[in-house]
Image (cartoon, grey):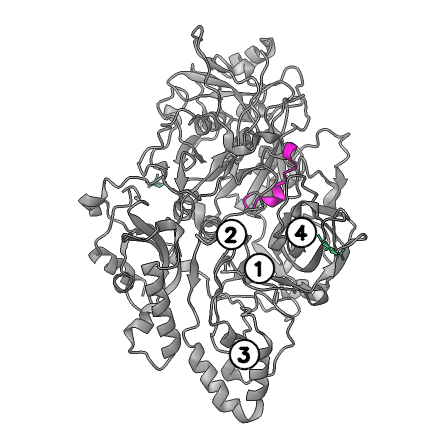
Amino acid sequence: MRALPLALFSILTLVSASSKRNYGENNYYVIEHDDQHVSLAAVSRALGVEVVDRAGELPNHWLVRAPKVSGELGARSEEGDRVLDAYARLRARSQNSARSARGDNEARTGAAIKYISRQTLRQRAKRAPPPIRQPKPSEDARAVALRLGINDPLFDKQWHLLNDEQPEHSMNVIPVWEMGYTGKGVITSLVDDGLDYTSDDLKDNFDADDSYDFNDHEALPTPKLREDTHGTRCAGQVAAGKNNACGVGIAYNSKVAGVRILSGEISDVDEAAALNYGFQNVSIYSCSWGPPDNGAVMEGPDYLIKKAVLHGINEGRGGKGSVFVFASGNGAASGDQCNFDGYTNSIYSVTVSAVDHKGLRPYYSEACTANMVAAYSSGSGKSITTTDKGTNKCASTHGGTSAAAPNAAGVFALALEARPDLTWRDIQHLCVENARMINEADGDWESVAGGRMYSSKFGYGALDALRYVQAARNWNLVKPQARLPTRTVQIEGGTMNPVGKYAGGQFIGGGGATSVLSVNWDMLQDANFEQLEHIVVRVWIDHSRRGDVEVELTSPGGVKSVLAEKRKSDNANTGYPGWTFMSVKHWGEDMIGDWTIRVSDQGSADHNGTFLGWNMVFWGSVIDTSKAVLYEVSHEDPVLPPHEEPQPLPPTTATNTKTHPKPTSYLSIEETTSTAAAPATTSAQVDETTSANVDAAEATVAQSLPTPSKEPSQISLIIHALQRKLVVGIILVVLASLVGGIILWRMHSRASPYIALSGEGNVPMSDAHSRPLADGDESDDDADERTGLRGDSYQHRGFHSGFLDDEEEHEYPPSAGRVSPSYRNERAGLEGRRSPS
Ligand SMILES: *[C@@H]1O[C@H](CO)[C@@H](O)[C@H](O)[C@H]1NC(C)=O
Ligand SMILES: *[C@@H]1O[C@H](CO)[C@@H](O)[C@H](O)[C@H]1NC(C)=O
């Protein structure tokens, strides 16, 4: 079947990959096509859409479009969407006709669409810059510059490279340069607002092949808007050349690509494509942006984006994995924490917080147990000096966690020159083991496994290039990844149905609510699990004020991860509908014993809530490398289903009657084993909500997919249960006289359509072919499609900037009397803005 889609592809009339989108005139959808049934062309015909392009690098995912018809309210209206209606008909058809109707074309077409979602536009925004004072010219800096032949005029202002006042506080890269590592052969992609490839400082290190503008759908990431300086500044930190312009980058002989997504609204499919752009040649994706840092939102990447991230992890860099670096966020002053951001709390991100030139935590830098390391950035009166947009222009006011992330990316580029074989997990292990403790008096440091210290503000400490690269040179690659999901604990009958309605659960009250999950030796053996790395904790908590809730997890060894602290700005009354937190604090710990979660609130008279359920996924390394499996994102629903006793049903009922519920905006990444080589797991280990062990009764009630309650613009319908009706028929015939009544009673007693999940959303790992699009496929009428920016309900991604006090720029040579443009940052929640101390 592999060759089939490619062959079909060539006869399709395709809209060019490079054509701009026109959201004003078209609706866009992403479909996941199962080519075992019917061709993509037939699917397109049946849905009344035309294929635009592949959906980034995701295998079998296609971007399609249909013109809006007059009267259709476009992106807002999901009722009356012709394409989704057509899809619903096909799907109903495929369910009704079941196995017998092999000849039914509509049924097979319905079965060929594994997933469809309409694309909506949203704005991602940056996380960037702060304040400066004129640094004193430094004789030492000049001496080093001379020895290394660095003539860059602003090098002596780059305290993050060489700090004369506090020599211990720098990225410590100069000794690595002296070892001969400068990033040669490594490409870092700045996923941002563009990259000024005409800059004298960047033009020699610019990688055009791996650059793209997803805002304007053009080949080059030209920073067109006045405020499009962020990506260029970040790029300068990584790879500004050793030349006569501004300063130097940490990996000044490495290459940088620019992928532009922050200068306007984009849809999930484009964000997904951006995070995989050039993913064979690009090693590092540096991301200094995310959901708003206002301390009021709890948001993560949607399904397609999570899928792209995992695709990069599993397939990127020749299978060694893309290195995703994320800024932890600038919302600390607003009470924000990086565990409320699904990008920074993904296990696939190296999350980087900020530390200033004095080794202090800047007021903006967010804490949480997803922080892995800290890197130097603005604070205590000094900022980061780097390249700016313009031919020979420099910035001296760069900062925020936005500037911390590229400093970390630069260090990883140095390490990957020394050791190109490091996997994405080796990069993380090296962070954990080689970061340097700073600000030791801070009370947040806690002694953790392996004699290390951990702080939710700085992670394992400040990233030190010399220590990192030296360790990398002698590093033994880690064994493949292992996964151990626990069962889901339901507390006092706690449930949440697909529309987010909670029932049952334990009242949190004054003393808080606690619950325990135990891990024993057998569970580790069964899961082929050797050494702990990340822990993902999923919770269902109903509360009338989310910001009051605090969640902490304590390990058998007594190490405590504070997963949620109270958030003063968070007044949401939607609770935690299956939200996932992440902790790297337990890295290397002994897992055996009791893991205790404690949920508490502020005991206020006005607000209260209940704790309904939770589970954990332990991630680490395998015992037996030969039994390792790759994980894929599954369609995961946040329901907390009623606890079920295993049901003695005949084998005929254990068929593939599975339904993937639609993804929702509040999902965090959940993975399931790939189908082929899943390790044996005991029922005790398998999370009930992800179990593929669907009983027939459950399948019958899973017919109607719920409508999304939270984000109506993100319609996502997932098909699977084509044989459901037949299965039900068989069950009824075979069992009618014996257990039919019992089954019917159970169906009836489960009024809400709880959905059991399976691993069927898995992408075949073999299917990662490169994009087959011929460049000549562009059709004339599409080349001029314009990006529609009219969306009126898009969501914002917050800048990780946010507090530029004395904004200032340097031109070199300086021109007199120029007024600096102020760095626009209105999306970051500026209510938390204040001056650094
Ligand atoms: C990626 O690298 C390979 C070989 O290193 C090269 O042939 C190919 O052209 C590169 N692709 C891009 C997009 O740079
Ligand atoms: C919880 O809060 C609501 C109002 O916010 C109140 O009516 C109710 O009595 C409270 N429940 C308890 C058990 O305190």
Asked if the beta carbon under badge 4 is closer than 8 A to the nearest atom of ligand 2, the reply is yes
Q: How far apart are marks 1 and 4 (CA)?
A: 14 Å
For disc 2, the neighbor class at 10 Å (few under 14, some 14 to 19, many from 20) is: some
For the question of whether residue 604 can be seen, the reply is yes
- Quadrant of the image occupied by residue 220: top left
714 or 531, which is in the foreground?
714
On residue 665, the disc is 2
Q: How far apart are marks 1 and 2 (CA)?
A: 12 Å
Callout 4 secondary element: loop
State the extent of the magenta-drawn residues as a range.
Answer: 333-343
Mark before the other along the chain sequence, 4 or 2: 4
The amino acid marked with disc number 4 is Ser
The amino acid marked with disc number 3 is Ala
- Quadrant of the image occupied by residue 457: top right
Mark before the other along the chain sequence, 2 or 3: 2
Is 337 included in the stretch rendered in magenta?
yes
